Image (cartoon, helix red, strand yellow):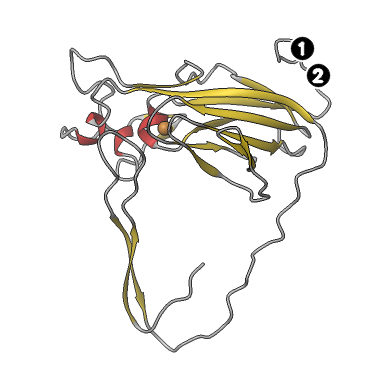
Amino acid sequence: MVKGGDAGIYRLRALQYEQGHPGGARPERLLATISSSGPRQDDPIPGRLVNPPKMPNQPIARRRTITFKGEISGNHEMPMMHHEPATPRKMLGITANCDAAPAACAPKQPMTGMPPVKFTLDGKVFDLDRIDQHVVAGTVEEWTLVNLDVFQHPFHIHVNPFQIVAMNGQPVDDPTWWDVFPLPSKGSVTIRTYFRPDITGKTVYHCHILPHEDNGMMANVFIHPEGTELDAKGEPRT
Ligand SMILES: [Cu+2]
């Protein structure tokens, strides 16, 4: 939350950002142009919006390791740079927004004779019908997210935010709740999350770089109702 300045025109920019990608840093981009006008308001800005919930003090029900790997084969940037007219593709029943996610509108394999771009979680590309993790509502889990690439992968999981408990194996003591967190180059982040009891069913976790996600770096997690027992393979007992 920001307080507007004196009357005038302001530009909101995303600064240049180094993701560690061999193609170089992401350039600065103009996000919005903001016009400040009218009588001045001096209302205070709240110091905090909510009192964040505490992580429940309960044992870790399960620990998992998830690996992130991109196979960019030298043409990783091609979907973004393709010049054919964009055709929106349907993903998860939703038609892609070509302005917000140009990669979703580019042809899947822009060049012939080169291996396709492939981004994987635990060696697999996304499959709508495959459940990759079974978890139980009301439990706390720790996931170690391993990035095998030199470039970052920002991890995002739907529904349940998470806390960071270790970076590259070094403990971190920070109660901040995260929605997305960048995995460092050739490193790991261990997260702790509480699967809240009131939300169950299938959802996803994925890399939040859209061309990575759209080329496979996403997986399904199924949150079973509280009290569900998982067998040795981590699947619900029937
Ligand atoms: Cu990624």
What residue is rendered at 51% in x and 18% in y? 122
Q: Is residue 85 above or below residue 53?
A: above
- Amino acid type at circle 2 is Glu
Snapshot quadrant of residue 138? top right
What residue is rendered at 84% in x and 26% in y? 227
**How many residues crowd mark 1 within 10 Å: few (<14), some (14–19), many (20+)?**
few
Snapshot quadrant of residue 30? bottom left
Q: Report the disc number at residue 229.
A: 2
Q: Which element is circle 2 on? A: loop
- Amino acid type at circle 1 is Asp
What residue is rendered at 48% in x and 70% in y? 2
Which x, y percent locates residue 127? 49, 18
Q: Is residue 110 left or right of residue 129?
A: left
Q: Is residue 71 left or right of residue 160?
A: left
Which x, y percent locates residue 234? 71, 15
Which x, y percent locates residue 143? 63, 29
Could you tell me if the residues under marks 2 and 1 are in contact, i.e. CB atoms within 8 Å? yes
Relative depth, front residue between 140 and 172: 172
Can you say which quadrant of the picture contains the C terminus? top right
Q: Report the disc number at residue 231.
A: 1
Relative depth, front residue between 217 and 74: 74
Determine the CA span between mark 2 and mark 1: 7 Å
**How many residues crowd mark 2 within 10 Å: few (<14), some (14–19), many (20+)?**
some
Q: Is residue 52 left or right of residue 9?
A: right
Snapshot quadrant of residue 115? top left
Farthest residue in the front direction?
170
Farthest residue in the left direction?
83
Relative depth, front residue between 58 and 174: 174
Which x, y percent locates residue 176? 64, 51
Q: Is residue 237 visible?
A: yes
